[in-house]
Image: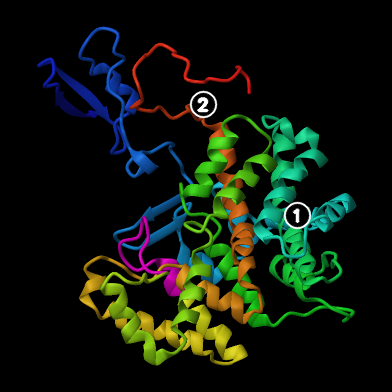
Amino acid sequence: MPDFLDVKDSRTGTSRQLAITDGAIRAADLQQLSATPGDHGLLSYDPAFMNTAACRSAITFIDGDKGILRYRGYPIEQLAEKASFLEVAWLLRHGELPSQTQYDAFVHDITYHTYVHENLKTFLSGFRYDAHPMSMLCSAVAALSSFYPESKDIFDPVERNISIVRLVAKVPTIAAFIYRHMKGLPFVYPDNDLSYGENFLSMVARMSEPKYRSNPVFTRAIEILFILHADHEQNCSTSAVRGVGSSHVDPYSAVAAGIAALYGPLHGGANEAVLRMIQEIGDKARVPAFIEAVKGGSGRLMGFGHRVYKSYDPRAKIVKRLAYDVFESVGMDKDLEIALELERIALADDYFVSRKLYPNVDFYTGLIYRAMKFPTSFFTVLFAIARTAGWLAQWEEMLLDKEQKISRPRQIYIGSPERPYQRTLTGPAGR
């Protein structure tokens, strides 16, 4: 027996029943609530989509109050501890963990497609050395559409699959080339004897050595961070991929839209803001004064609080332990000491606890990336490499969802009513 919401319209005195499915009512059902013939019923008004579900998804589950994050039902803690990133990428797209045969074939396909067209190197070389790496990444991924025009056939399963494989394979290569361009270093080609994460680190850091071998702590760290950032439900960038993808554009253009959204400081740039805050504090002894300034309204505690999580971000717990491992390898850092002191004081202060301001995943990731010698402006590129797997899973789910149409939000018009044109210009028209 379905559930219903009984609604009485005070404008007309009429009552309606709206069906409740999965804890939601369809916004289209509000059209039943019309006051006069032809008024098209009610709209729902929800700025920033704070309480509106735009899709039904089977990919990622979040319970922000309980601090739960699961990919396809698997707890993020277990995946970060036991899985590889490519295993998670397969899981996000297909819904089940791969068999050994499926995994081996997937790794082979990804490995085969890590190289990019030589013309893309020329394209990247056209950017200034100090161009922001996210603008370069966004442009380069969008440019892939011109290399693979057949990718526009998005409803051909074969073409769709090869496009997804190409993106997962090539985005790390493009990102590494961008890093080398920033540093004025020659590009390093993929070494397909290496794992996904170590191959990326090789393309970033390899110099004259005949065979690159990364610090195993760094290899594990990059793998775990990629898993933690692979998907996070209907966030800004994922919504951008779905929204742009709903026009049935090719996946390279849709993912480029996600990269553009991730570029924003309110989304992917948060870990940069954490690092800047820590560097501004400068010393562990200054943390109490900084906390008091935040409580007094003259500062902001970056890396605490989350739009969804109202308890400790489960990813933050994993990243905190990972930070200890990385700094044990490279040596303790005063910035990590400041971060730990910030967390200790804030979690003991009712001002933050009562507002449910707990550390989020961004609080420690910037410190880890910096310990691995990545420049601050490159942090969001690392985020984008990982999130590409989630974006593509979400994009394909959207395409195959028969309820989805081209994204086209409604608006509530608050401008002028109809009025006649009266010329106010004194000179000739057209100037």
Q: Nearer the viewer, residue 83 or 313?
A: 313
Identify the residue at image location x=58%, y=92%: 331
Q: Is residue 93 shown to the viewer in this render?
A: no
Identify the residue at image location x=36%, y=56%: 308
Vertical position of residue 138 compared to residue 343: above or below: above
Residue under numbered circle 2: 405
Whether the magenta-drawn stretch holds residue 316 is answered as yes
Q: Which residues are magenta?
A: 303-318
- What's the CA distance linking mark 1 and mark 2? 29 Å
Residue under numbered circle 1: 170
Q: Where residue 404 sits: x, y (%)?
A: 50, 29
Whether the magenta-drawn stretch holds residue 229 is answered as no
Quadrant location, the C terminus? top right
Query: Residue 191, labelled with which disc?
Result: none
Vertical position of residue 100 compared to residue 157: above or below: below
| Left or right relative to 254: residue 397 | left
Amino acid type at image mark 1? Lys
The main secondary structure of the magenta stretch is loop
| Left or right relative to 357: residue 420 | right
Q: Is residue 88 shown to the viewer in this render?
A: yes
Q: Report which quarter residue 224 is drawn in.
A: bottom right
Q: Nearer the viewer, residue 416 or 203?
A: 416
Identify the residue at image location x=89%, y=53%: 118
Vertical position of residue 253 compared to residue 190: above or below: above
Amino acid type at image mark 2? Lys
Secondary structure type for disc 2: loop
